[in-house]
Image (spheres, rainbow, N blue to C red):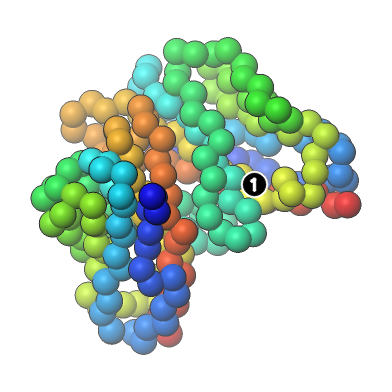
Amino acid sequence: NAGVTQTPKFRVLKTGQSMTLLCAQDMNHEYMYWYRQDPGMGLRLIHYSVGEGTTAKGEVPDGYNVSRLKKQNFLLGLESAAPSQTSVYFCASSYALSGTGEQYFGPGTRLTVT
Amino acid sequence: AQKVTQAQTEISVVEKEDVTLDCVYETRDTTYYLFWYKQPPSGELVFLIRRNSFDEQNEISGRYSWNFQKSTSSFNFTITASQVVDSAVYFCALSEAWSGGGADGLTFGKGTHLIIQP
């Protein structure tokens, strides 16, 4: 039982490049989330999904797209990376809506955009 | 809109001292949930506690205790007899109950960096 895994762990991109971050969970959770963590800012919600095939915007969605084609996977895409997207990205999953169920976090992906 | 404030950016204490981390929240909902997470230097997020708005009982878990006061919209976290291993960034977070149209997810405070000196 791996819990929540994220791929890759580290990545350096040049401005304008694209990439996809993969989040996978093996707990059969319906709900999945992407957050970004910036120094002194705490975590902020980018996008979330309440089930396979559904996605919704969070607090800071601009510049990102997501897809949830399979229940266990939640992908975060950057179509044209910008230095402002340098951050640590955390994926989380939950068996219930965020209040009623604990969110399980992945180990994070450190992304640097130069 | 919901908001979480952790006014203490950094706290430094000597080992074995007690330390309290403050958390003040804002929400319009009567049903909501409060959380504390720990982020050690390794970077992962460790769940510590979840409390719903209808349960104001204080909770103790070993050296950790939490004081929830709706009257002051606070959910403070105390570590008794601190240890070096407690050094981490601690986040308080809030989630409002699902209303069928609002955004899901947690709203985090900016975190308090706790340094325990030997």
Q: Position of residue B117 (x, y in %)?
A: 85, 52
Q: Give the secondary structure at mark 1.
A: strand
**Residue A51 lies in quadrant:** top left
Q: Position of residue B62 (x, y in %)?
A: 70, 28
Would you place residue B77 above or below residue A113 in this image?
A: above
Query: How many numbered circles are shown?
Result: 1
Label 1 packing within 10 angstroms: few (<14), some (14-19), many (20+): many
Q: Residue at x 54, y 23 (%)?
A: B73
Q: Is residue B116 left or right of residue A78?
A: right
Residues A113 and A108: in front is A108
**Residue B28 lies in quadrant:** top left
Q: Residue at x 78, y 31 (%)?
A: B80
| Callout 1: chain | B
Q: Is residue B48 left or right of residue A27?
A: right
**Residue B102 lies in quadrant:** top left
Q: Position of residue B90 (x, y in %)?
A: 61, 45
Q: Residue at x 58, y 25 (%)?
A: B74
Q: Is residue A14 left or right of residue B98?
A: right
**Disc 1 residue type?**
Thr
Q: Is residue A82 left or right of residue B66?
A: left
Would you place residue A51 above or below residue A68 in this image?
A: above
Confirm whether residue A56 shows in the render: no
Confirm whether residue B77 shows in the render: yes
Quadrant, the N terminus of chain B: top left
Q: Position of residue B30 (x, y in %)?
A: 37, 17
Residue that label 1 marks: B112
Q: Residue at x 63, y 53 (%)?
A: B40
